[in-house]
Amino acid sequence: MTTLSRSANIIAIWISLISNLLLTGIKIIVGFLFNSQVLIADGVHNAGDVIATIAALGSAQVAKKPKDSDHPYGHGRAEIIGSAMVAIIMLFAALFIAYHSIESFLHPAAEASYIALIAAAISLIWKQCLYFYCIHFGKKENSKSLIATAYDHLADVYASIAAVTGIGAALIGEKYSIGILSYGDALAGILVAYFVIRLAYHMGKEAVDILMDKLVAPEKLLQYEELVFSVPEVMRIDRIRAREHGTYVIIDIRVGIPAHLSVQEGHDISRKIKQTIMERHQNVQEVLIHINPWYAEEDTDLLAK
């Protein structure tokens, strides 16, 4: 990732942080003034987003540090840790929302407010714009912390949709004396919790997979294999593994080349393999290659069998 790209990512996270601070204040104040459980819960969720965005900002700052003697592969996994922290915060926020909403069913339905509806609608539009903005830059630069921030915004979009629907249903229930709709606000809070828990689970699973060095997708490995075999001197691939390391990928390869080639020729072939892969895949930062000797008789023996 270039310095310019990292700066753009950090700016996007700062925009998210300021937006979350403003929305937290708007939702909690309006929620308490007009006794909207879903808006209060959504505001608390936004307060959690502030912490999550700070975590994403901190991890992005660490991830941009260059390699050093203690971290020869760079600091890319800091973004994965930040992503995992965002997932944990989202999970706790979802549980809080669910508790608050279920508790609301034990009390008389609160009077719905058009001000609360407008606040929820503003949040919906605002968060949808932030999601598109962050997911665009996050995927473009493969920034896990920014993608996590984008999904956090998406969770807020779900929350705001549920809030608008719930408050709207409550307003309709009051106008036409439909008792069950008066609890639309509380029911919306439960739906919010469900969607946020789903997002938190998928984000957390992806972060754990990367931290546990899970291999990249099989189709990616096939692409790497094709590029390795495009080097004429490569006779076989004994092993190929690739793992994500934050914003970039590290590949380990063992290949067989004709045994009669010199050490210098083997070195040149390794360099050619590395260049071929890294030219086609900009997110590959390191290709570790081990050369094994290959003998023509091996293929002859296999054909005989």
Image (cartoon, rainbow, N blue to C red):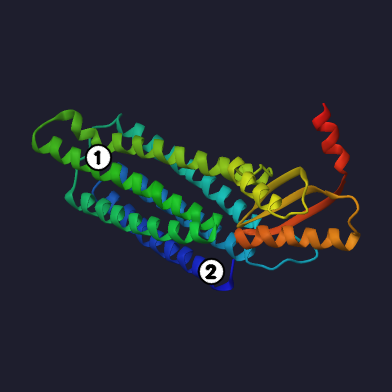
| On screen, residue 161 above or below 12 | above
Q: Disc 2 designates what residue?
A: 5
Q: Nearer the viewer, residue 149 or 48?
A: 149
Residue 19 visible from this viewpoint: yes
Direction from residue 91 to residue 229 in the image, left or right: right
Direction from residue 140 to residue 282 in the image, left or right: right
- Quick one: SS at disc 2? helix
Residue 74 visible from this viewpoint: no
Q: Residue at x 44, y 50 (%)?
A: 152
Q: Position of residue 45 (x, y in %)?
A: 41, 48
Judged from this view, the residue extending furthest toward the bottom is 4
Direction from residue 272 to residue 92 in the image, left or right: left
Q: Residue at x 29, y 56 (%)?
A: 125
Q: Disc 1 designates what residue?
A: 166
- Numbered tag placed on residue 189 in the rendering: none
Q: Crowding at label 1, few (<14), some or many (≥20) Cα neighbours within 10 Å?
A: many
Q: Crowding at label 2, few (<14), some or many (≥20) Cα neighbours within 10 Å?
A: some
Quarter of the picture containing the C terminus is top right
Q: Nearer the viewer, residue 120 or 296?
A: 296
- Quick one: SS at disc 1? helix
Q: Residue at x 77, y 50 (%)?
A: 234
Question: Image quadrant of residue 250?
Answer: bottom right
Q: Nearer the viewer, residue 273 or 88?
A: 273
Name the residue type under label 1: Gly
Quarter of the picture containing the N terminus is bottom right
Lower position in the chain sequence, tag 2 or tag 1? 2
Judged from this view, the residue extending furthest toward the left is 176
| On screen, residue 259 above or below 19 | above
Question: Image quadrant of residue 280?
Answer: bottom right
| On screen, residue 19 above or below 49 | below
Q: Position of residue 65 (x, y in %)?
A: 66, 67
Name the residue type under label 2: Ser
